């Protein structure tokens, strides 16, 4: 079985650099699919209140027979719960739905800079949760440099991670550098751009030279950049393929060629203007 490297977060907690994402996995399929990922060897699962499938994640961890402490589980605060008390309650609901007594990582899913509740208030709620030990680490998602800088200036705990959209068409060199400057680990969401980059000739060319698939080359690019990734798939063969990244290496030249594919193309909303509350 492949050995997945770990990354040390700024509070000393270790996170497996490769995990499994469950966005868009229907709730009724989540237990079975997550269990398949755990069988393949993944030990890090990324879910969110918004995905509606936390229950299946918790069931899969229990059904796997693994110790809870052997699986790193992340969830994220839904957009409607940014007010302090709502955030605490929503966190409790996540634990209940997952059937866990703690989360390994809990994130503010979106900064929502245009809503009435300032994300600084939301973060203070997460700081309280962290101090109880029920979230072993806390972080943010979709924070732009200005959001991150303000949070760090105005609160006590530096986020452990910033989970942002990153793939070869959105390489995020600047935001990753801001994260690194503050000791915040970058997590790359939609790491294979939901499949969009897989027929790019630069990527398929490198893949055929390496005898690997395009998805493996893109995921390996993330790993060598030092980001944390959690590709999603409901397909067993792809779940296996995406885990098989540790028997080859990309040259500096190939790394540069992939980074140069950046065209600032987002799949998701722009965090500066996204203020959606369900
Ligand atoms: P991914 O980049 O992981 O791509 C998933 C898609 O690619 C699916 O359609 C899957 O198909 C397909 N796929 C997976 N592996 C392969 C492969 N080896 N070859 C070809 N196609 C493949 O996209 P996601 O948007 O799911 O991102 C990953 C995770 O990031 C999410 O699950 C979630 O945990 C997180 N995320 C976080 C966000 C945030 O705002 N914080 C936003 C979006 C995602 P199939 O399933 O049919 O096999």
Image (cartoon, rainbow, N blue to C red):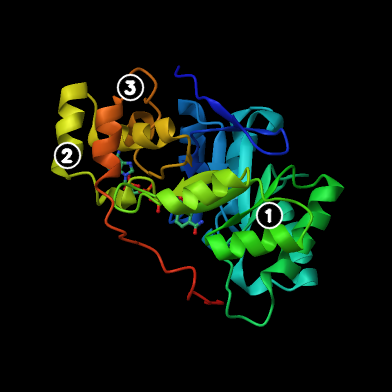
Looking at the rendering, which quadrant does residue 153 occupy? bottom right
Crowdedness near tag 2: few (<14), some (14–19) or many (≥20) residues, C-alpha within 10 Å:
some
Helix, strand or loop for disc 3: loop
Circle 1 sits on which residue?
97
- Asked if residue 22 shows in the view, the reply is no
Q: Nearer the viewer, residue 236 or 192?
A: 192
Crowding at dot 3, Cα within 10 Å, few <14 / some 14-19 / many 20+, comes out as some
Which image quarter is the N terminus in? top left
Residue at (86% x, 49% y) in the render: 132
Q: Secondary structure at mark 1?
A: helix
Reading the image, the residue beneath label 3 is 249
Closest to the camera, between mark 3 and mark 1, is 3
| Residue displayed at 46% across by 41% down | 230
Mark 2 vs mark 1, foreground winner is 2
Mark sitting earlier along the chain (2/1): 1
Residue 216 visible within the image: yes
72 displayed left or right of 252: right
Mark with earlier residue (2, 3): 2
The quadrant of the rendering that contains the C terminus is: bottom right
**Badge 1: few (under 14), some or many (20 or more) residues near its Cα, within 10 Å?**
some
Q: Residue at x 64, y 27 (%)?
A: 66
**Upstream in sequence: badge 3 or badge 1:** 1
Determine which residue is flagged by label 2: 202
Mark 3 CB in 8 Å range of ligand 1?
A: no
> What is the residue that sits farthest to the right in this orientation?
132
């Amino acid at each position: 079985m492949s050995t997945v490297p770990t990354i040390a977060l700024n509070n000393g907690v270790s996170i497996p650099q490769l995990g499994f994402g469950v966005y868009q996995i229907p709730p009724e399929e989540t237990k079975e699919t997550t269990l398949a990922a755990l069988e393949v060897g993944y030990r890090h699962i990324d879910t969110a209140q918004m995905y509606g499938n936390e229950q299946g994640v918790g069931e899969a961890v229990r059904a796997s027979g693994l110790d809870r402490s052997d699986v790193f589980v992340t969830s994220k605060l839904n957009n409607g719960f940014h007010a302090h008390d709502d955030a605490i309650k929503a966190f409790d609901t996540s634990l209940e739905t997952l059937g866990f007594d703690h989360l390994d990582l809990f994130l503010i899913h979106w900064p929502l800079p245009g809503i009435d509740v300032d994300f600084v208030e939301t973060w203070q709620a997460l700081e309280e949760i962290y101090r109880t030990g029920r979230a072993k680490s806390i972080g943010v998602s979709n924070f732009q440099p200005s959001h991150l800088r303000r949070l760090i200036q105005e609160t006590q705990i530096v986020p452990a991670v910033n989970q942002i959209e990153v793939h070869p068409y959105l390489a995020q060199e600047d935001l990753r550098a801001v994260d690194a400057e503050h000791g915040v680990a970058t997590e790359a969401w939609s790491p294979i751009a939901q499949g969009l980059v897989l027929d790019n000739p630069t990527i398929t060319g490198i893949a055929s030279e390496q005898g690997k698939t395009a998805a493996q080359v893109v995921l390996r690019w993330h790993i060598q950049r030092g980001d944390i990734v959690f590709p999603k798939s409901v397909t067993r063969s792809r779940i296996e393929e995406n885990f098989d990244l540790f028997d080859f290496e990309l040259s500096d030249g190939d790394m540069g060629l992939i980074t140069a594919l950046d065209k600032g193309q987002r799949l998701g909303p722009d965090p500066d203007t996204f203020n959606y509350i369900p």
